[in-house]
Amino acid sequence: MSDTSSHEAGFQPDHKTRCGYVALIGAPNAGKSTLVNQIVGSKVSIVTHKVQTTRSLIRGIALKDENQVIFVDTPGIFAPKRRLETAMVNAAWGGARDADVIGMIVDARKGLNEQIETILDRLADIKLPKVLILNKIDLVKRDTLLALAQEINERLTFDETFMVSALNGDHINDLLDYFSEHMPEGPWLYPEDMISDLPMRQLASEITREKVFLRLHQELPYASTVETEKWEQKKDGSVRIEQVIYVERDNQKMIVLGKGGATIKAISMAARKELSELLEANVHLFLFVKVRERWVDDPERYREMGIDFPI
């Protein structure tokens, strides 16, 4: 991921360009992050089986011909019970209201359930172009897909309906073509080789958090986070990174460390491998686990994650 380019941000060729934002919204685990990664062609948003993995607005930037489309991966929308969950849902709706086009992603296997109906009801009040994206079509019969598309459009009329597989890439190009053509005319907002506006330190934190969740899926409570505290570029081109995994209680710390440190070692190896590939350099990763009680009630932690602290 590069911060420099032969094109300056806002560069505009001699002919007209288009540039705008597409907010991807939906229930948790609908496939928003997978779709953004597939469209951009690189990992910009972490993906795990744990619901509500995405906590803040992650922007993935795609180019189609002379047009730039900025996809906003939002946290999954659900009925929040805790402060952190409320902040995430608020961020998702805020991202939707600020977009040029809204893409609602629905897991085609789950169909039109109560969770989707609630989102549709609120979406009806947002006066922006809307596109329905039925995801995971490789797992559902075509007749079922057509019936689901009709059922959802009867509840809320969408400008267009797409059926895709974010995982396999099926029909992703058609989706990008559509969004590209429906962005407002204007100059690009980012350099042409930039695929995300996420700072590298924050992306590194997200990658390690992904590995924590993948390794400990059910064992570790949702309230854990990762912060990159030190980032040092060495003379030999390698990078030294120090990160802290924060949990809320001592017993959670023991879970992350594992017997004889085996779990934290496995997490570190997986994160180091991906970071080395991303940075195209050797990475020396040092992970620490600390207890920070009730960190979910600390406004500073929300600023670190890029979301507003709910009062």
Image: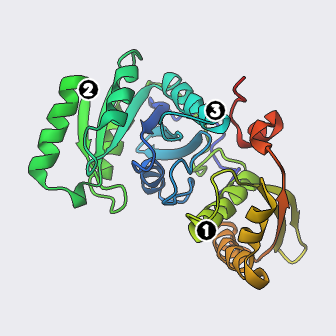
Is residue 284 positioned above or below 142 on the image?
Answer: below
Q: Give the image quarter of residue 264.
A: bottom right
Element type where label 3 sits in the image = helix
- Residues 280 and 147: in front is 147
Element type where label 1 sits in the image = helix
Residue 183 shows in the view: no
Quadrant for the C terminus in the image: top right
Is residue 255 positioned above or below 173 on the image?
Answer: below
Instruction: Give the CA separation, mark 3 to mark 1.
Output: 24 Å
Instruction: Give the CA separation, mark 2 to mark 3.
Output: 29 Å
| Crowd class of label 3 (few under 14; some 14 to 19; many from 20; radius 10 Å) | many
| Kind of residue indicated by mark 3 | Ala
The disc placed on residue 216 is 1
Give the mark nearer the N terminus: 2 vs 1.
2
The disc placed on residue 141 is none
Residue 301 shows in the view: yes
The disc placed on residue 159 is 2
Residue lying at 44% horizontally and 38% vertically, measured from the top left: 24
- Residues 106 and 85: in front is 85
Judge depth for marks 2 and 3 and give the one in front. 3
Residue receiving disc 3: 87
Residue lying at 18% horizontally and 25% vertically, measured from the top left: 154
**Model colouring:** rainbow
- Residues 77 and 2: in front is 77
How far across and how far down the image is residue 278, in percent? 64, 67
Residue lying at 30% horizontally and 56% vertically, measured from the top left: 165
Left of 203 or right of it: where is 233? right
| Kind of residue indicated by mark 1 | Leu
| Crowd class of label 1 (few under 14; some 14 to 19; many from 20; radius 10 Å) | some
- Residues 271 and 245: in front is 245
| Kind of residue indicated by mark 2 | Asp
